[in-house]
Amino acid sequence: MPFSALYIPENRVVTIDDGGQQPRELWRLGELKCHLPGCEHPMTIVCGSERAFHFRHMNGECGCDFVDAEQRAESHEHRLGKRFVARGRSSELQEAGIHGFTVHFERPFPSVRRIADVCLVYAGGWSEVHEVQCSHIDPGELENRIHDYWSAGADVWWWFSDSLGVANRAAIDKAKSMGVPLGSFTVETHESRG
């Protein structure tokens, strides 16, 4: 999950990409905390040997009571997939002359206890949720998530990593039968650490 954090001095959510090549020089220890409901734990910036910069809870755990174990163990491929989707959809809309939207990473939907991977919020308040799938998902779980977002008033798009092959064929078929727009992506998982 640690792709975004609350930058305390400005009281705004930032993504690790906002920090450029050297985010540790932009944000100092004590200036970041988790933005998810019920957490607010301090965050730090880390970079492992095979992963790009990302945020991490300083105490090791997110205190948001509806973040599940899978979200806590988000892969590098998943973070890159979220970037790919956000940048691609933003470019597509801007090329079509649509500019009245903001992009949010890891946007909470407390009413349905979900956290959207990427959410575009348009000027009128309408939300477009984009879920990025880099692992197997049961078709029933996919259906539950879609219904949850719909009940929160959001449209849903689902993106599947090409690295999965046919592992999610049943989930893809379920999403298609529900009329959910689908996409696929391939990401390079070896990224310069700056």
Image (cartoon, rainbow, N blue to C red):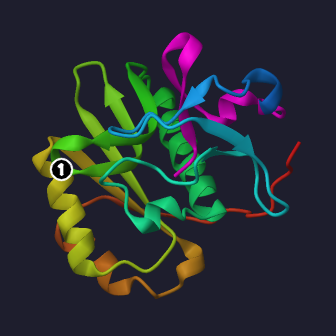
| Residue 116 rendering spot, x and y as whole percentages | 36, 48
Q: Amino acid at mark 1?
A: Val
Residue 2 in the magenta stretch? The answer is: yes
Relative horizontal placement of residue 177, taking residue 27 as reference (left or right): left
Residue 190 in the magenta stretch? The answer is: no
Q: Residue at x 33, y 41 (%)?
A: 108
Q: Residue at x 77, y 31 (%)?
A: 23
Quadrant location of residue 185? bottom right
Relative vertical location of residue 142 with respect to residue 58 in this rendering, above or below: below
Relative vertical location of residue 96 with respect to residue 1 in this rendering, above or below: above
From which residue to which does the magenta span run? Answer: 1-23
| Residue 143 rendering spot, x and y as whole percentages | 20, 69
Of residue 46 and residue 163, the one placed in the foreground of this image is 46
> Is there any visible trace of residue 11 in the rendered image?
yes
SS under mark 1: helix
| Residue 27 rendering spot, x and y as whole percentages | 72, 24
Residue tagged by mark 1?
112
Q: Residue at x 43, y 20 (%)?
A: 99
Q: Residue furthest top?
A: 10
- Within 10 Å of the Cα at label 1, are there few (<14), some (14-19), or many (20+) other Cα atoms? some
Q: Residue at x 40, y 82 (%)?
A: 168
- Callout count: 1
| Residue 28 rendering spot, x and y as whole percentages | 74, 24
Relative vertical location of residue 171 with respect to residue 145 in this rendering, above or below: below
Relative vertical location of residue 167 with respect to residue 20 in this rendering, above or below: below
Q: Quarter of the image containing the C terminus?
A: top right
Of residue 36 and residue 169, the one placed in the foreground of this image is 36
> Is there any visible trace of residue 179 in the rendered image?
no
Of residue 159 and residue 136, the one placed in the foreground of this image is 136
Of residue 176 and residue 127, the one placed in the foreground of this image is 127
Q: Residue furthest left?
A: 151
